[in-house]
Image: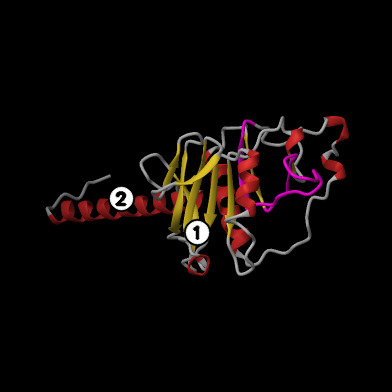
Amino acid sequence: MLQLQYLPNSDELPDSDNTPVDNEDQNFVPNLLLFLLEHIWKNRHDWYFGADMGIYHTTGVNPRVPVIPDGFLSIGVERRKNGKSRKSYVMWEENYIAPILTLEMVSHSYGDEYEDKLEIYRKLGVTYYVIYNPEFWKRDGHVPFEVYKLIDGDYHLQIGEPFWMPEIGLGIGRCVLPTDPLRRQVLSWFDENGKRYLSPEEQTDMALKKADETQKQLDLLLAKLRSLGIEDIE
């Protein structure tokens, strides 16, 4: 491992590789997971979720060359680094805490998600590696949703969806959000019982529907009472 004094700090490292994403879902899906996590863990301050952000590490040849997952989750780090927004995730500035989960979305431009990146994340010690391949899984000889877990230094493909990750306290899997007019398939977080966490928008919508249904039942009851000649009802 390189000595800390010889490593660049985050201000000296580029915060982007200037490579555009292949499609809009590569931004939409990770950011959806982030925004939902902001709600689920709103009272926690020991985690960070990055979307399309470089992870600088010392397991490769050049520490100035990052690996850039579509999304990643780290636990046991500051919510905001020194109270500021991160430009990138620099391992030697994070006490060498590796992400506990990385997400790669396979797109038209194949990016070695099943080979090179898997090996990089293995070396980093990433516990869970999620590969989401909704469109090109047949081309690549895989299934649309895969979760690999690092066990004894090697990745092993897991079964089950949504897949529960006890080290994180969350499950992950596919769904179609009922509030999405485009009916897009996305990834979401689930609880231990396989129940999907609802977004604030969904919770508000459900509360309004419940209130509306309660009012309808009340109106029916009042109408019935009036039909029985009971008028003085408050």
First in residue order: circle 2 vs circle 1: 1
Packing grade of label 2 (10 A; few <14, some 14-19, many >=20) is: few
Task: Please identify the quadrant where the N terminus is shown.
Answer: top right
- Element under label 1? strand
Give the magenta part as a residue range: 52-76
Q: Percent from the top left, x then y, of residue 28?
A: 59, 59
Give residue 88's quadrant in the image: top right
Q: Where in the figure is residue 207, as x and y percent of width and height?
A: 40, 49
Q: Secondary structure at mark 2?
A: helix
Residue pictured at 79% horizontal, 50% vertical: 15
**Residue 31 or residue 234, whichever sits in front:** 31
**What secondary structure predominates along the stretch shown in magenta?**
loop
Task: List the residue tagged with mark 2.
Answer: 214
The front one of 129 and 31 is 129
Q: Inspect the magenta stretch and tell me whether residue 156 lies in it.
A: no
Question: What numbered label is drawn on residue 147?
Answer: none
Residue 206 left/right relative to 36 = left
When the figure is inspected, residue 42 is found, relative to residue 112, above or below; the finding is above
> What residue is pinned by disc 1?
186
Q: Amino acid at mark 1?
A: Val
Q: What number of labels is visible?
A: 2
* Residue 225, horizontal then vertical, whole percent: 17, 51
